[in-house]
Image (cartoon, rainbow, N blue to C red):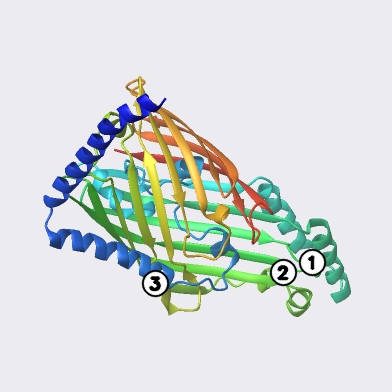
Amino acid sequence: MHSSHNGGTQPCNSQVSNLLNFTKGSLQMYSKKSIQIIFALLILLGSVAVSSLATAESLVQRHTPRMMQGTRPLGMGNAFIAVKGTDENAMFYNPAAINDYEKKFHFQFLLPTIEFSYKSINFFAQDIPNLAEDIDAANGNAAKINVLDAFAAANTGRYEEVGLQGNVAVMMHKYITAALFYDTQGVIALLNAASSTVDMEVETNAGLMVGSAYSFFDDMLQAGLAVKFIGRHLMDETVTQRDIIATAEFGDILSLTEFGFGVGFDVGVKGAPPIHGKVWDYLKPQFALTLQDIGHTRFFAGQPVGRQKQSFNFGTAIHPDFWRFKSIFAIDIREIDSRTDFLNKFHAGYELTWPEISKILRSVSVRVGASQAYPTAGVGFDFKYFKLNFATYGREIASRTIQKQSRMLNVQLAAGF
């Protein structure tokens, strides 16, 4: 045992020395000014992030703080910050990944994504319309209150969501990318067991996002910036006994007139240290940092419609290939600057892709993961002129980890060339 240990010390020291010399030589290739720029950017990301503190938020903003969460990322635990940019999701998760696109233009159109919680369809399509009809048909204030009380008692604890989002058009290029997008999220919740109240919220964001990214040091570092021009409509109402008495019809309670306009900025970096080796080259690891909605995206024109909360995020991913398969394993720590449990910030996922199946069906992907301690899964089919993705994931809607899950189903259809 002692002989073996002593015999292995000198080679180990030699390997460490070689690694240090290689790293030193690599760093000497770069100017001091370039390295200072990198450190300045990282310090900026960190300093702006820690300056953010949590404030009161709406239901949508509390549980879906980021716009345009894609079906593919959601299937793999919503861990996507360090993943190589190959589709329209890249610019919404990390603008640095724009630089992974090809040096030619690709376009996608009409990308509707529909998502809904497990029991939401009947709730939105039947239960809520029936409640409105029953309240309007009730004879007198007491009868209206009885209808609301009975509905609240039968549905206390329910939290149902529906969403519709997509890109009207996306232009993707290695150095410039743009997307016309829309994202609508609706929530109906009865979480207050002590009173007969129904929280109703619909938030719609739509606008233009433009991003650009460049690489440095022989593509070992990528940096990107995205600008978002957003128009937001917001309906945020808590229906109470007083509301149904004070209005002639149930629909008069709801206000859809709140609108605001804002401009937001995202920055991101992605890359890997200058290390080489058989295992390292096989795994192709990437590390990433993003700061989204820098300083909070505020809507400065129109009525008060809340704000898009700033988010500081870290991610890492490996991209090993074996036989005919391509795979990705990713881990993200999201919303680092928010006051919540660590598990609510933790996301991890895996994607296995079988490429080049045929001229019509280009690839099939299977995805699994964990998002906020809840399991996720997904599958994707990439055809020649369109792709179809499915995902299911859990979202924490309580203030702490693993208290109340909203189980979501998500479907996306994309067409492009």
Q: Is residue 82 above or below residue 261?
A: above
The secondary structure type at the circle numbered 2 is helix
CA separation in Å, label 3 and label 1: 44 Å
Identify residue for label 1: 135
Q: Nearer the viewer, residue 326 or 332?
A: 332
The percent position of residue 31, horizontal first and vertical second, equals 11, 57
Name the image quarter holding the C terminus: top left
Identify residue for label 2: 250
What amino acid is found at the position of numbered circle 3 in the picture? Gly
Q: Mark 2 vs mark 3: which is more N-terminal?
A: 2
What amino acid is found at the position of numbered circle 2 in the picture? Phe
For the point 33% across and 40% down, which residue is it? 285
Identify residue for label 3: 295
Closer to viewer: mark 2 or mark 3: 3
Q: How many marks?
A: 3
For the point 78% across and 59% down, which residue is it? 156
CA separation in Å, label 1 and label 2: 7 Å
CA separation in Å, label 2 and label 3: 38 Å
Q: Is residue 111 above or below residue 144?
A: above
